[in-house]
Image (tube, rainbow, N blue to C red):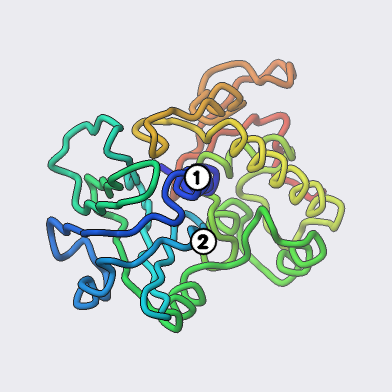
């Protein structure tokens, strides 16, 4: 469930609580939770956490030791969480990695991932560059408007799958795609090639607003998302269509929200999000 806003909230909390701390030990409960670089794990012991960055839905921790930089990249996937030791953990058997720190505001960071769709990768700088290049498209929060317009002009296919295509636009999942499209009055199955520039600009502006508002609200705690300190995001209180099947359209058009089944469930108003050229 975690998407870009949730990953950004995680990133901000890790920066606040752990930057400058020394990694004393790292316990890995099962080898298959580390996608690559497991043999380099001993290097990380004694390294200082110098940076935390978000790439799409993933969080990268940058460590420094003896003039070298290496990275631990945690994919949040469908159910992955990074949690501090002070945060109560449901089903602790699904904690697969524990990082013990000294000198930070928190003493331990846990990687909890019951379904294991996400993994941890231990990478040097060239490895991180390759990882980013093959996995992540533009960041929808920081991409300039003119670049976004050019990107959309060059694409084909249906609109919602494109918004969720991580190698094109990194970080948007099903929840925020639904919210962005409803607010822009665009049908999820609209052909991207049929969008006029004004519609693309409206989509860009709405995308920026929704994602930034969600970050400021701590994300959307739907199902199992918690920030590292255990707090829940409350942007779900601002959802207009996601999970609202059968409820009246918030635009007061007189229709009710419908659920469309495709790759992922889409929630649409049949009046406000008609599938025609704009």
Is 174 on the left-hand or right-hand side of 196? Answer: left
* Residue 42 x, y percent position in the rendering: 20, 72
Is 263 on the left-hand or right-hand side of 37? Answer: right
* Residue 204 x, y percent position in the rendering: 75, 51
* Residue 11 x, y percent position in the rendering: 49, 49
Determine the secondary structure under disc 2. strand
Q: Do callouts 2 and 1 mark residues in contact (Cβ within 8 Å)?
A: no
Determine the secondary structure under disc 1. helix
Q: Between 264 and 194, which is closer to the camera in this rendering? A: 264
Q: What's the mark number on residue 55?
A: 2
Residue that appears at 71% across and 43% down: 186
Residue ID for mark 1: 16
Q: Compared with residue 253, is residue 125 higher up or lower down, i.e. above or below?
A: below
* Image depth: mark 2 or mark 1 in front: 1
Q: Residue furthest front?
A: 103
Residue that appears at 50% across and 45% down: 16
């Amino acid at each position: 469930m975690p998407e870009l806003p949730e990953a950004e909230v995680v990133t901000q909390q890790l920066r606040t609580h752990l930057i400058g701390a020394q990694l004393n030990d790292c316990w890995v409960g099962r080898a298959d939770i580390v996608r690559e670089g497991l043999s380099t794990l001993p290097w990380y012991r004694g390294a200082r956490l110098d940076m935390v960055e978000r790439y799409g839905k993933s969080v990268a921790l940058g460590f420094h030791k003896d003039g070298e930089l290496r990275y631990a990249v945690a994919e949040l996937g469908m159910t992955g969480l990074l949690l501090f030791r002070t945060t109560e953990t449901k089903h602790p058997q699904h904690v697969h990695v524990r990082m013990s720190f000294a000198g930070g505001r928190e003493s331990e960071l846990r990687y909890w991932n019951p379904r294991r769709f996400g993994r941890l990768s231990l990478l040097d700088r060239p490895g991180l560059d390759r990882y980013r290049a093959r996995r992540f498209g533009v960041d929808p929060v920081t991409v300039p408007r003119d670049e976004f317009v050019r990107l959309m002009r060059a694409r084909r296919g249906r609109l919602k799958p494109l918004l969720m295509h991580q190698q094109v636009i990194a970080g948007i999942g099903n929840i925020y795609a639904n919210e962005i499209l409803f607010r822009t009055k665009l049908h999820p199955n609209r052909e991207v090639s049929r969008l006029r520039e004004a519609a693309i600009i409206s989509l860009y502006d709405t995308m920026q607003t929704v994602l930034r508002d969600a970050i400021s609200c701590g994300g959307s705690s739907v199902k199992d998302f918690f920030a590292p300190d255990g707090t829940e995001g409350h942007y779900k209180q601002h959802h207009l269509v996601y999970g609202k099947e059968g409820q009246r359209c918030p635009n007061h058009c007189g229709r009710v929200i419908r659920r469309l089944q495709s790759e992922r469930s889409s929630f649409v108003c049949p009046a406000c999000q008609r599938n025609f050229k704009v």
